[in-house]
Image: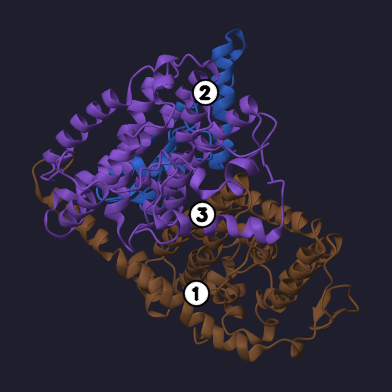
Amino acid sequence: MAQPVPGDLSPVEAQLLRLADDEYVLAERYTEWQIYAPTPEADLALANIAQDEFGHARLWFDLLQDEFGYEEADLLWERDPGNFLHSPLVELETPDGDWADTVVRSYLYDVAERLRLDALADSSFDPLADRVRKVQSEEGYHREHAQSWLDRLTGGGGDAHQRVQSAVDRLFPHALTLFAPTANEDEIVAAGVRTRSLADVRADWLDEVVQYLESLDVVVPDPSAVTRPDEVGRDGSHTGDWAALHEEFTATYRELGFDDPATLRSENA
Amino acid sequence: MIWEVFRQEEAGDRHTHCGNVHAPDREMALLFAQIQHGRRMQTNSLWVAPSDEIGEVDADETEFGGTTDKSYRWAITYNQIDASFAEEVAESEAEQEEAAEKRGDV
Amino acid sequence: MDIDDVKARAGPREFSPSDDLPLEYREAATRMLEFHANSEVMGGYLDKEFTRMAPSLDRKLACTAKCQDEIGHAQLLYRAAETLGVKTREEMLADLTNGEGKFLNCFHYPVDSWYEAPMIDFFVDGAAMRRQATLKDTSWEPYAHAMDKVCFEEGFHVKHGEDILRELMTSSKANQERTQEVFEEWWPRMLQFFGPTNDESTHNDFAQQVGLKTVSNDELRNSFLNMYMPKAEKYGLEIPEYPRIFERDDGTMAVREDDLDWDEFWTIAKNDFEGSHEQIGSRRRRQEAVEWVRESMTDWETAGADSPQAAD
């Protein structure tokens, strides 16, 4: 089976890849914090969130395997980096020690994810709709976690507040790419794979994040005024950060010359 | 600050102490406790309480149950009465016998 | 209680925070627990590298769950140490940062390939699990409780480690050869995991007398050899000729101590090895980078305590 190529996908494939790739890459960035997090408790919480996100990616990759004949190798280990459809928001490197970046990124992503999942809960593609609830229930903790950190980091003022502001300034333009369309966008909506347009979801997301962040005295850039990054993600265009990450996580697979990635599931999985 | 964590395995069970978490306040303590103490063991509910708020009195400081004879408050003392007429009375007696063994009174 | 009482009463889970224990006991227990907790953290520094390298999604998940467990165990162990009233978690973590805190020899060697994953995740973890199982009978009750939870969680670590080894040793010749090379590099370090035989270790005797340690270094190494040499051989690994391992008259396995590099071991024990500096330095930089978060949380906590709505 060949690998997925943007521009040559069915609407369902495109939707599933957006989901899977976002979750997978975000999880990779989260795991970078393991052992390095500010406190053991913070470490464990983020590690759990990372496992949830990998688990969601796996759910969507499994669906792509079951319904479209892909293998894990086609989707992760042997897929060209330019054929991944995640938003650059999730691929950006986290600056050393920048916990603010991670909680801001997490918050912006998690609100969008909730809105996305709500719009997929009644998908015309049953296998997708069936899996949404499982994912939604784990995502609740993620949002609560991000907001709890943001409330507290901005609550004290000073240095921590400034770091949150800087993270918002830097990440916000990339967060907008969460709502960029793939080539299949019209069909995705027309076929009812997703029951809301990206534009509508984006509008709700904007209202919510602006209101919340402003309540913390954080200034949100005006979407119409920000410099849009060249890399959009949904069309396979990505930053140098992704190239480096992709190289790193596929290196061992290539070095070992494996072609059948190991699975570890119980019979009840 | 340190928060002690108590886990309830299944609905209806008592909460039992299972460890602690460091957190700046109760909300964060609950978020952290879910992961540190609820991610692998069967858990229906978790409580957190500030470690400083937990008082303790132990066997070195007090005689739990007293030292003078109080056998009148144990069913097993009433050995001229047959409890088998009522299941619940017999059961209470059996449980008290077990507790007495644990206390080292038999 | 004086130290003679302690020695007389020493037994599994005998002492708890409600006991009034002599300083000597409390310091010895703190030392052991601190070493153990520090090792979980510093082992984590090696293990986290494998998460990014993992050549399948499920292996990646297993790796990240293992790292999570390690930090969880560190948390439990620092807490069990704190209950002795000698050092706070903050002090122990500060000592680990400044190079005073001691930790397992194996974690003074940085890793850089997946071939090293089974060395840490199967052999070193296996040795640790063996030791942890015996510590369920330690005399300091909070330590034993921590071991209950640790032993419960660690089973999958060792099994995953073995599975990684199995996969490598049943794949290409190149992989098998590389794994063998890496095994030869790690084998002496694994044997030194248990420390020198009994008469060399300073604190050993006392720890055994007061029930903190229930099994000698030698017995632990013997168990390890009996369990893990057959496993290594099962997967086609050759046990290196040196250090020479022989069977004593009583059937237990022994290692020719002179064949091992104890100079390196004692340099490591002083945190003075090249790898020690690298690992400790790496951690120091990471910790400094997030100090601002801890400060922010402390500020928040203090502000909360001062405000009228302290409870919520």
Residue A126: image x %, image y %?
Answer: 53, 15
Q: Residue at x 37, y 31 (%)?
A: A181
Figure coloring: by chain
- Up/down of A259 relative to B100, above or below: below
Residue C43: image x %, image y %?
Answer: 54, 66
Residue A225 in view here = yes
Residue under label 1, please give it. Answer: C28
Mark carried by residue B75: 2
C141 to the left or right of C95? right
Residue A127: image x %, image y %?
Answer: 55, 19
Residue under label 3, please give it. Answer: A246
Residue B52: image x %, image y %?
Answer: 27, 51
Q: Are marks 3 and 2 in contact (CB under 8 Å)?
A: no
Nearer the observer, disc 3 or disc 2? 3
Q: Nearer the viewer, residue A111 or C18?
A: A111
- The CA span between labels 3 and 2 is 73 Å
